[in-house]
Image: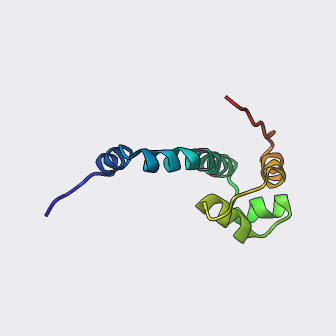
Amino acid sequence: MISLKHDDIKKHLLQDPEVKSEYEKLQVLYNIKREIIRLRLEQGLSQKDLADKVGTKQSAISRLESGEYNPSVEFLTKIAHALGKELEIKFY
């Protein structure tokens, strides 16, 4: 049986320019999702707690954190404020 590590598979797949381009497009949303989860957990909030602070349903937070939802800037601003943060968008 052949055992492949995640990093090895990722490295191999990213050699394809099309795959690499799609991966890079998704990286921004992945980073946003990861930061929201980090801040929520750091503050000891459940998804329901955060949803209540934002004025939405727990399922909306779940979809956001799982990557099933492409959030609007307005929604991300509400999330940021509920976490005691400001949303900042930069172009590099």
Residue found 67% across the figure and 63% down from its top: 69
Is residue 16 or residue 73 the one in the foreground?
A: 16
Q: Quadrant of the N terminus?
A: bottom left
Q: Position of residue 85 (x, y in %)?
A: 79, 40
Residue found 78% across the figure and 63% down from its top: 51
Q: Quadrant of residue 56?
A: bottom right
Residue found 33% across the figure and 46% down from its top: 7
Q: Quadrant of the C terminus?
A: top right
Vertical arrangement, residue 39 with respect to residue 58, above or below: above
Query: Relative to 50, is 34 on the left or the right?
Result: left
Vertical arrangement, residue 43 with respect to residue 64, above or below: above
Residue found 60% across the figure and 60% down from its top: 67
Query: Relative to 62, is 88 on the left or the right?
Result: right
Q: Residue at the far front: name it.
A: 18
The colouring scheme, among rainbow, by chain, secondary structure or one colour, is rainbow
Q: Position of residue 9 (x, y in %)?
A: 31, 51
Is residue 11 or residue 43 the one in the foreground?
A: 11
Is residue 5 or residue 85 the one in the foreground?
A: 5
Q: Quadrant of residue 75?
A: bottom right
Q: Position of residue 46 (x, y in %)?
A: 68, 61
Q: Position of residue 35 (x, y in %)?
A: 63, 45
Is residue 37 or residue 69 the one in the foreground?
A: 69
